[in-house]
Image (spheres, helix red, strand yellow):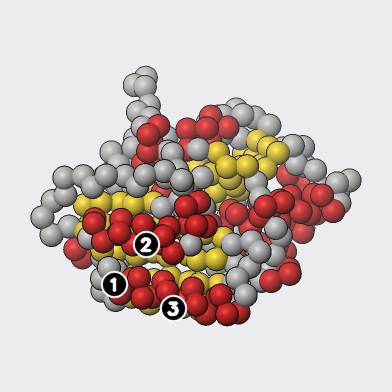
Amino acid sequence: MTKELVLKENSRSVAGQELPPIPDCEKNTGTILLFYQYKEPEWTEKEHKSMLKKVIELGEKQNIKGRGRVAPEGLNCTLSGTAQSIRDFCKGLRKMNPIFSETDFKITDNVSPGQLFKSLSIRKTKELVAYGLAGEKAPSLKEFAGEHLEADEYHKAMMEKDAVIVDVRNHYESALGSFQPPSGGAKLIDPQMRNSIEFPKWLNDPATQKKLNGKKVLMYCTGGIRCERATALLNQMSAAKPDELKPKAVYELRGGIERYMKTFPQGGFWKGKNYLFDRRMEQLPGNKTETL
């Protein structure tokens, strides 16, 4: 059997690090940026309004296009621009507020023009992910967030038989592709949610909790943002009712499927396509050209 190609350098976060250098880009191509950053304690109403204004001004200054959400709990964006303007935008955020030095900016260069955004839309919202857990309802990430595993570490964890893998995405995304752990390894659980607001109810179900008790819980999503609150909610519930819900450990895939595919360009344990919330629409591992 051919040894799986693993690009460990692609699995590491750029939080607190230099941004990746600009590669030799093909003519007329652009760059896509995915990132999120949670804020605890939350921004005040005044700070929230100010951050919205500043992000829009920075985007317009760098001629950035795309979509974003600014909530009291943080910022989440999917943007496009030139390789230089995207990096300048990231540096601008870091200069604007030290919290963005903690941000894991995921940058993809050499994207065809047809897959780039045409306009900029940054919206003011109550939550970054619609779990129905805004404000005081939100489990603290500082206190309860799951442990982050790099893509290569997560890959190894999927081989463990005492682990379960929870897909935190919506079912229409899961139907396009998902992790398929090896025989004798972890068991995949698909909550089959229509939208994220159904996740807390699914997690409260005794049948769900029975599947998670005593297991290493490995959560994953597209880019990581949905797993932040999801793992925190599980750990918070476990702390409140340890006799009813007690997983062995709770982990999340740092950088999500997007980074796993860059780390395992031959696919690893991933089968199918990764649904994307930008004009690319879907993603395959780097060395794959069709759905497996």
Occupied quadrant, residue 265: top left
Which circle marks residue 61 in the picture? 1
In the image: residue 247, left or right of residue 254: right
Name the amino acid, label 1.
Lys
Give the distance between the C-alpha atoms of the residues marked 1 and 3, in whole angstroms: 12 Å
79 up-or-down from 240: above or below:
below
Q: Which residue is mark 3?
A: 53
Where residue 73 sits in the image (x, y, percent)? 60, 67
The spot of residue 263 in percent (x, y) is 39, 37
Q: Quadrant of the C terminus?
A: top left
Q: CA distance from mark 2 to mark 3?
A: 14 Å
Q: Secondary structure at mark 2?
A: helix
Tell me whether circle 2 and circle 1 mark residues in contact (CB < 8 Å): yes
- The residue that disc 2 covers is 92
- Per the model, the C-alpha gap separating discs 2 and 1 is 10 Å
Could you say where residue 206 lies in the image, as x and y percent from the top left?
Answer: 80, 54
Residue type at tag 3? Lys
